[in-house]
Image: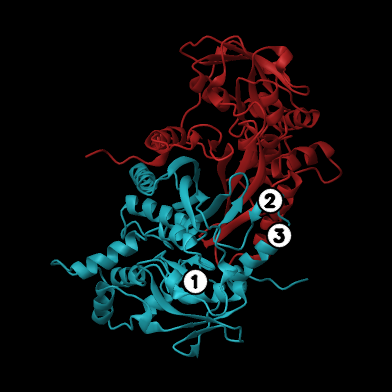
Chain colours: A cyan, B red
Amino acid sequence: MAPFRTVGDIGERTLLAGFARAAAASGPGVLIGPGDDAAVIEPGATVLSVDTAVQGRHFRLDWSAPEQIGARAVIAAAADIAAMGGTTTGVLVSLAAPADSSAEVLIGINAGVVNRAAAIGAAVLGGDLVEASEISVSITAVGVLDAGGPIRLGGARAGDVLAVSGPLGASAAGHALLAAGGVAPDGDPQGRAVVDAFRCPAPDLQQGPAAARGGAHGLTDISDGLVEELALMAAASGVALDVDSAAIPVTDAVAAVAQRLGVDVRRWSLGGGEDHELLGAFGAAAQVPPGWWVIGAVVGSREEAVHIDGAPTRLHGWRSV
Amino acid sequence: MAPFRTVGDIGERTLLAGFARAAAASGPGVLIGPGDDAAVIEPGATVLSVDTAVQGRHFRLDWSAPEQIGARAVIAAAADIAAMGGTTTGVLVSLAAPADSSAEVLIGINAGVVNRAAAIGAAVLGGDLVEASEISVSITAVGVLDAGGPIRLGGARAGDVLAVSGPLGASAAGHALLAAGGVAPDGDPQGRAVVDAFRCPAPDLQQGPAAARGGAHGLTDISDGLVEELALMAAASGVALDVDSAAIPVTDAVAAVAQRLGVDVRRWSLGGGEDHELLGAFGAAAQVPPGWWVIGAVVGSREEAVHIDGAPTRLHGWRSV
């Protein structure tokens, strides 16, 4: 008999990869199945993805307003659609909550979902509500592909230019600041900026279709931190990636909060997730859409696939935040 | 300031109705939005629904094998697609679990999802895995409409015949038998039949498209018990419904287990959920598909919308199982 293994022993990524293999027998209308940012099916190249946020892990009611929690969940799911080069047209909401939860909190989360969906041009299509021991919100995003899509995670090619669609690390900086006690009492616009970014990131999701129109070879959203997404893109593409950490954009607010907390800002720009900006591989610098930042290059495969500033980096284990 | 209200105070149905109203501003490609069994969108009249099962509420690991838990979650979501007259072509899976969960349990749940999806002709399109304090599995089902669909919950008309697609109460009987100690040690085929029905119901989901082709006016799946679904159909259709409890089909196994446990079998056939058979309103008895049972009639609206054996019935409050 096999020894008892926990989810933590195996790791989320390994388990999900096994799930994707188990599901590999895909049907006739499936253009892209599990393992990428989102699935693409017929009819009409419909794009689908699901993302779940859990109280205490992904959000805290004392750190975020209910509306922010709902809005953030929409962005997380819609960013997966953008990462295929698609536009989100609708969302389904599954809310779980204890029966003694505040109804106002759930109404607020739902309002955040509805309002943010409307802001990105998506309709709320339905959902369900179940009893559970903690609050969670699961969003299924459905979208359509733009011209040029779908752009796969595994499409990066040696010789490509690597670029990101916006500054990184603000959500991680906001989380760190809240954990350290929050914004300063008077003013503190820099603290507020990063805390706002943690409470609800606001990536420009139209950069996904823009990357597709620009002919991106590979595309994903940065939900689990840049280094982790680089490792996934490298593995899926069979290539290696070289990144210059000084080229990764960070806002002045992130830099200032890093200095205030005595943190190397690269900890957030390289390791922090939840900004939901996009990482793309483009055939030439001229194909990188306006407003993106070039951060490195795609090279031929090697044992240690991801190099930051010339040195290999690795990540391991269960990470679900 | 509004008094503090819990989810339990307000009730799941009332809260969901409020969510549906909040989402009412639907987009241009939305053919059917929230409030029905599933949403229908363009392109291609794509049908979408989500359903979540939570450990301790919807399943117990000591009562069901992991594969059964996964299979049952697929049926629950796919039944919503059938209830619009559609066929499920794909599912997305969101699994939540503590980091110290058995990986084999999660792999088993996923295998149940994959196998049951394949059995109904659907592909597993993707999913996510998050850390939570209990195991839950959320399935988003996506499907296509058959000729005749979509069939709305609110389409029943006075003069229609009410019918169900299969015997009811087996899942509730199985739950009751497990709660009473399980099947008898020797044989007990009747006990096994109802416990199997609880662990994983096996409705014929092709009866949804069959009802649509037959010209059903109203259609829904019986996930929360017949009386609750009757109340929803009556409210959505602006009609009243008369049901003859003796006409509701129950299997011999359900009748035998009811007798064994000293339970009025109507408690399960009228109140038990999770069988996921379909309830339809048809313009004439001749339109009821083969294999369905006529259980009552649709009449003009009145204050107490649902009458069972000539007497009004009511249901209240939070019910999420």
- For residue A282, which numbered disc appears in the image? 1
Q: What residue would you read off at disc 2?
A: B123
Mark 3 lies on a secondary structure that is loop
Mark 1 lies on a secondary structure that is strand
Can the viewer see residue B209 in this picture? Answer: yes
Q: Which mark sits nearer the N-terminus, 3 or 1?
A: 3
Quick check: B77 above or below B109? Answer: above
User: Image check: A30 left or right of A115?
Assistant: right
Quick check: A202 above or below B319? Answer: below
Q: Are marks 3 and 1 on the same chain?
A: yes
Dot 3 falls on which chain? A
Alpha carbon separation for disc pair 2 and 1: 31 Å
Quarter of the image with the N terminus of chain B is top left
Residue A310 percent location from the top left of the image: 47, 90
Residue B261 percent location from the top left of the image: 72, 33
Identity, as a three-letter code, of the amino acid under mark 2: Ala
Identity, as a three-letter code, of the amino acid under mark 3: Ala
Which is more foreground, mark 2 or mark 1? 1
Q: What residue would you read off at disc 3?
A: A24
Give me the residue at 61% from left, 31% from top: B84
Around disc 1, counting alpha carbons within 10 Å, would you say few (fewer than 14), some (14 to 19), or many (20 or more)? many
Marks 3,1: beta carbons within 8 A: no
Relative to the observer, which residue lies in front, B138 or A281? A281
Q: Quadrant of residue B187?
A: top right
